[in-house]
Structure formats: structure tokens, C-alpha cells
Image (tube, helix red, strand yellow):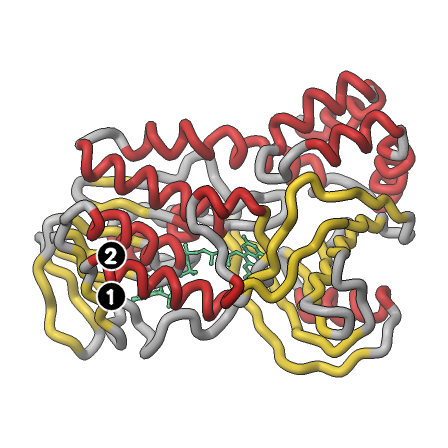
Amino acid sequence: MISIIGAGPAGCYLGYLLAKHGKEVNIYEEHSEVGKPVQCTGIVTSSIDKLIKMKKEFIVNEVKKVNVYSPSNKILNFKLRKKNYVIDREKFDKYICKKAVEAGANIYFNHKFVDYKQNRIYFDKRKNRETDILIGADGPSSKVAKCKNMFNNRKFVIGLQARLKIKCDRNTVEFFLDKDYFGWIVPESNDIARVGVVAKRNVKDFFEKFLKRINRKYRTINYQSGLIPIYNLMTKTSKDDVFLVGDAACMVKATTYGGIIQGLIAARELSKALLQYRSYERLWKKKIGKELKYSLMIRKIMDKFSNEDYDELFSLITNKDVKKIIESIDRDYPSKIIMKMAIKQPKLLKFAKKLY
Ligand SMILES: Cc1cc2nc3c(=O)[nH]c(=O)nc-3n(C[C@H](O)[C@H](O)[C@H](O)COP(=O)(O)OP(=O)(O)OC[C@H]3O[C@@H](n4cnc5c(N)ncnc54)[C@H](O)[C@@H]3O)c2cc1C
């Protein structure tokens, strides 16, 4: 018996892959349904199609261009090499869950995991259950990681976003850089967008500041917020018969804070590890370890940027060749961008010094 805590994308995709191969799988979710509350902007590159074929029923929009703004609002615009989907996270999560159930996994709602001892899983106000293997797919505050002493001193940023009625271009996603926050406008259409910021602290203040910065008329439809774990090279992802996947294992890109694709890839690798008795750590690191590490490195450099540094960076990137490189490469693979850009524009190397 394999027990998965958390029916998010990572947990359900893993449940689907294991059940499809004949494993007995139970998925336990603390909420009464999958996909709620939504705590995500839901923008993903089309690389996701290699894992889960995207369906019209949960694609809200497709974007083809990106505008990036420096703190003084200098703009760089790029064409996206691959289309990016803006998805409905609730429908997407429900779709993967349905696939898991159709493949034979059992799902138990209103089961809040609280502890694990000697192969018994303990839930809040529910009878405990036995398992052979326990998977923590329970998101950034992973209780599974905590109860196996794998949580350590993780760091988080906080995301706050609102769905706004606001004028925007449905083909273009907008990213805003600032020394204190990372902001975005992700369009659902020409007049509805997911607008948000990520910051280490005071996220509400930075969100207000950001709304003033974009200086457009808007009406708020609703708010969403959530924790985003910072990838950490020291994070352990398995101990004895317990494994962590997705946000529970901090598998989020520290550059753009995207974690959906990384969680799905790690889930696929964990299914291989369990089905073929291979090392999970080795498998997931081979697929996403390098990119998570490079994203973290870029983030560490960016965290030391002043607003003037960002402006200088923008003036260097205006170089046609550098822009071409950025446009030609998938943002899920930052390692490929860095070297090529540094060769075309050696002045960019001065920013690497900030790492030390
Ligand atoms: C504001 C914001 C915007 C984001 N935007 C993007 C984006 O545009 N693109 C992108 O790729 N990523 C984005 N992310 C990150 C993305 O949401 C996560 O990486 C992704 O949801 C991780 O999936 P997961 O399955 O690992 O965990 P989750 O989606 O967090 O799922 C965990 C599940 O476990 C359940 N659970 C938790 N604790 C327990 C418990 N004790 N017992 C039982 N069940 C439990 C939860 O209810 C939940 O259903 C964003 C995050 C935030 C906060």
C-alpha cells in the first residue's frame, strides 16, 4: 500500500502513474474537494504537454509574448518560443485527480494528516490507517516533512494576487522587477487578469505599491495568497519509507516561482523509483536538479540587485543577440540561457560577482 498525503497536482499525478501500473494507492486530502482554495497564477510553458496533455476545458488563455519592466519601467519585450498556457487551477487539479481515480487510486477527502509512526498514518478526527510507503505531496508547509524531521529551516516567500477586471493584452504576460518584489499581470482575456506580487515580507504593502505602479483602473474580483518554498540544496526528499514531492520538497524555481511542472516531473520520477526500486533522489536530480540549482543561483544574485542594477541589466539585454538567446530558450531551463548570454554579452558577468 502506498499512501499519498495531498491531492494537488504532484500527489494526484503520482497516484495516477502508480495506480496505472497496478499499485494499491490511497490519496488523502484535508479539504472536502480537490483544487480549492486556488493559490496559484496558473501560468505554465507548453513543456507541460509532455506530462499531461492540456485540454480546452482548463485552458483559460494562451500567451505568446512577454513584457519585462525594470524598476524605472524600462521595457524589454520578447516573443515566447513556446506558447504559455494560463490554466484554471481548480479544473486542472480536478482533471488529474479524476485520472488517478479512473486508474484505480482511492481518494479520501476531509482527511487531515497529523502524524506518522511505525507505518501508521494519524489523521485529525479520523481513524488511523496502515501503509507501507508514505508520500508527502502536502504542499509548502508539509506536515509529512515535519514529522520525519525533513522540514529543517526552510525559507519561503509569500505570493499575494488578485483577479482584477483591468485593461490588458490577452496575448502578453507582463513581469515587473523591483529590489523588493516580483510582480506580474497574467491575462485571462483583454479585460481580466491575475495580478500579483511575491515578496519576502510586507507582501500587502508591496501589492498596494505595485497596483499604484501599474497605474490602471481596476475592479477586484477576488484575492488569493499562499506560501512559496525556496529551493534549498540541502532539502532531503526521502527518509526510510517516506518520500517528498512537489512543494513539499521545495521543488519550485526560485526565479519565477513556478512549481507545477517541476512537481509533475518529480512525481513521474518518484513513480519510476518506486516501480523499479531505483534511487528517487538520483532520478529527480537528473531531471530537474540542475535547473532548480541555476534558478536558485540567479535568485541569489537578483536578491542583491539594487534598482539601478536592474536598469543597467536592461540596457545590456537590449543587445539584439542577447535578446535572441532569451527568446530561443525555454524559461524552465535557465542553465541554457546563462552561458550563452554571457558569451554574447560579457558585461553581464559583472552581476555574477554578487553571488559571492
Ligand atoms: C500566489 C502563487 C502563484 C503561483 N503561480 C504559479 C504559476 O503561475 N505557475 C506555477 O508553475 N506555479 C505557481 N505557483 C506554485 C504552484 O502553485 C505550486 O508549485 C504547486 O501548486 C505545487 O503543487 P503540489 O501538488 O506540490 O502542492 P499543492 O498544490 O500545494 O497541493 C498540496 C495539497 O495537499 C493538501 N494538504 C496540505 N496539508 C495536508 C494535510 N496535513 N493533510 C492532507 N492534505 C493536506 C492541500 O490541501 C493540497 O490539496 C504559485 C504559487 C503561489 C502561492
Element carrying mark 1: strand
Q: Residue at x 75, y 58 (%)?
A: 171
Residue at 81% in and 28% down: 322
User: Which of the 4 image quadrants contains residue 11?
Assistant: bottom left
The C terminus: image quadrant? top right
Q: Nearer the viewer, residue 129 or 24?
A: 24
Residue 59 vertical position relative to residue 281 in the rendered view, above or below: below
**Label located before the other in sequence (2 or 1):** 2
Residue 52, labelled with which disc? none
**Mark 1 sits on what residue?**
28
> Mark 1: which amino acid?
Tyr
| Residue 21 sits above or below residue 353 on the image | below
**Horizontal side, residue 109 vs residue 191: left or right:** left
Q: Is residue 305 visible?
A: yes
Give the residue furthest to the front.
56
Tell me: 255 left or right of 305: left
Please tell me how many numbered marks the rendered image carries: 2
| Dots 2, 1 in contact, CB < 8 A | yes
Foreground of the two, 212 or 322: 322
Which residue is found at the position 65% from the left and 57% from the top?
62
Question: Where residue 180 appears, x then y in whole percent?
Answer: 74, 54
| Disc 2 target residue | 4
Amino acid residing under circle 2: Ile
Q: Looking at mark 2, is its residue's CB closer than 8 Å to ligand 1? A: no
Describe the element under mark 2 as helix, strand or loop: strand
